[in-house]
Image (spheres, grey):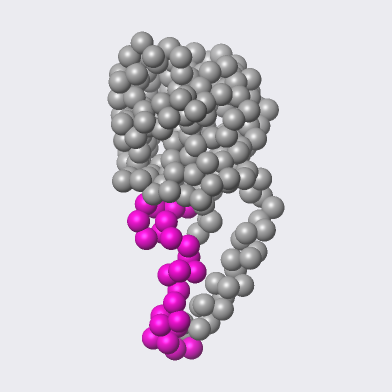
Amino acid sequence: MDKHDRVPTDFARPLAARHTPTGIKRGGLLGLALALGLAAFLPALAQDPHHEHHHHAMPSTQDGYVRTQASYTIPDVKLLDADGAGVALRSELDDKPVILNFIFTSCGAICPVMSATFSQVQTALGPERDTVHMVSISIDPEQDTPAALKAYAGKYDAGPQWQLLTGSLDDSIAVQRAFDVYRGDKMNHQPATFLRAGPGQSWVRLDGFASAADILREYRQLRAN
């Protein structure tokens, strides 16, 4: 399991905390072998060179998500919006506060919930939504053409401040890796929302199903700081 995969209950605790000496006694030699294997695995995971982002705070568990603060380097890639226009992602995300997630239009479980939540966020923001840049990036760009994104945007009444982006498979994977959400297959997609108050500032990452009220609270807290 990826070291940043979290769910807001038992898995929010360190792995080592769930492998106690009692558990080893009960499992006998098999338990001991598993524990030793875990001890050998954790240092290597901590030194994984492919994870270039840096978390600056311990996770705090809210009702439906795990909150962390992190720094991500946005790759210098060009994506396509729902009109087929090219978008330089790095500069595009540097103009306003950002609320960002990753979706794919044929998703039948996680993405409809996240997109309905984004729709609720834009409604709750009212006129204030013009001051924030909402972005949903496809993790299935081979299927998610600009036309598919346009239809998807209409389904959730996406306003002009909510941009849906696609592009080449390589560029999509580069962005997913940059935000540590790449899981190798779209069916392994996990819910996560990212917020940033402005260019050069840290991102707040919400792993799990953050509600519209959760996202609005986090967003306004960022803006107030």
**Visible residue check, residue 155:** no
Q: Residue furthest front?
A: 225
In this rendered view, identify the residue nearer to me: 200 or 108.
200
Magenta highlight on residue 14: yes
Q: Is residue 150 above or below residue 206?
A: above
Report the number of discs: 0
**Visible residue check, residue 56:** yes
In this rendered view, identify the residue nearer to me: 181 or 200.
200
| Residue at left offset 48%, top offset 88% | 29
Q: Is residue 97 left or right of residue 49?
A: left
* Residue 145: x %, y % from top left: 48, 24
Q: Most prominent secondary structure in the magenta stretch?
A: helix
* Residue 11: x %, y % from top left: 41, 59
Q: Which residues are magenta?
A: 5-29
* Residue 203: x %, y % from top left: 54, 35
Q: Is residue 157 left or right of residue 199?
A: left
| Residue at left offset 46%, top offset 14% | 131
Residue 21 lies in quadrant: bottom left
| Residue at left offset 52%, top offset 41% | 69
* Residue 19: x %, y % from top left: 45, 74
Residue 158 lies in quadrant: top left
| Residue at left offset 62%, top offset 43% | 53
Q: Is residue 197 above or below residue 72?
A: above
Magenta highlight on residue 172: no
Q: Is residue 46 left or right of residue 101?
A: right
